[in-house]
Image (spheres, rainbow, N blue to C red):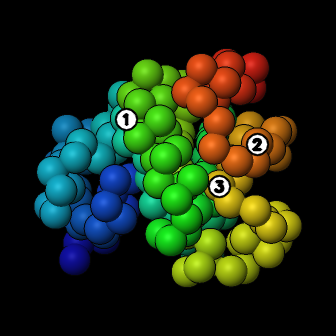
Amino acid sequence: MNQEDVIVQCPRCGARNRIPAEKKGRNARCGKCHMPLGIGSSARAPEHPVKVTDASFQQEVLESPGTVLVDFWASWCGACRMVTPVLDQLAQEFSGRIKVAKLNVDENPITSSRYGIRSIPSLLFFKNGSLVNTVTGALPKDELKRQVQSVL
């Protein structure tokens, strides 16, 4: 690997991609799911939810400029499965203005514990790294959209 090469994690599938120095600033795509990686000068909040872990939470959420909505969920949770398509739609509608992230509470107990997650789905809104709002439960799309707009 060349010293100028960068490693970029895909916001959709989490795959790590090596971007050669000569391709920086171009429209690089993930080698696994082919989603644009947004590493050029026009980088913005992705159109799809980003997978976040205990290891990546600091970088993906707390150090992320702007607004980040984090969905604390679990695969066995029926209400979480109901909220997923709504969050996918909101990520597309508010692309460039808000980053939507998903954190599996079963696989990431440290971050879940740090924020006192006791009920899922729990949606935490961060603005420039600071927690500004929390919503618990499966809310209708219109209500979630209103929550997003109030934070923006």
Callout 2 environment at 10 Å: few (<14), some (14 to 19), or many (20+)? some
Q: From the image, state whether disc 1 or disc 2 is nearer to you.
A: 2
Which residue appears at 71% of the width and 26% of the height? 147
* Residue identifier under label 1: 47
Q: Earlier in the sequence, mark 1 or mark 2?
A: 1
Res. 3 image quadrant = bottom left
The image position of residue 124, as x and y in percent, is: 73, 47
Which residue appears at 65% of the width and 36% of the height? 139
Position of 101 relative to 120 (above/below)? above
Residue placed most toward the observer, 68 or 109: 109
The image position of residue 27, as x and y in percent, is: 19, 38
Per the image, label 1 sits on a secondary structure element best described as: loop
Q: From the image, state whether disc 1 or disc 3 is nearer to you.
A: 3
Residue kind at label 1, given as amino acid type: Glu
> Which disc, if any, is residue 147?
none
Total marks shown come to: 3
The image position of residue 109, as x and y in percent, is: 68, 80
* Residue identifier under label 3: 121
Position of the N terminus by quadrant: bottom left
Task: Determine the CA span between mark 1 and mark 2.
Answer: 21 Å
* Residue identifier under label 2: 135
Q: Earlier in the sequence, mark 1 or mark 3?
A: 1
Position of 78 relative to 42 (above/below)? below
Mark 3 in CB contact with mark 2 (< 8 angstroms): no
Which residue appears at 43% of the width and 22% of the height? 93
Per the image, label 3 sits on a secondary structure element best described as: loop
The image position of residue 41, as x and y in percent, is: 36, 32
Per the image, label 2 sits on a secondary structure element best described as: strand
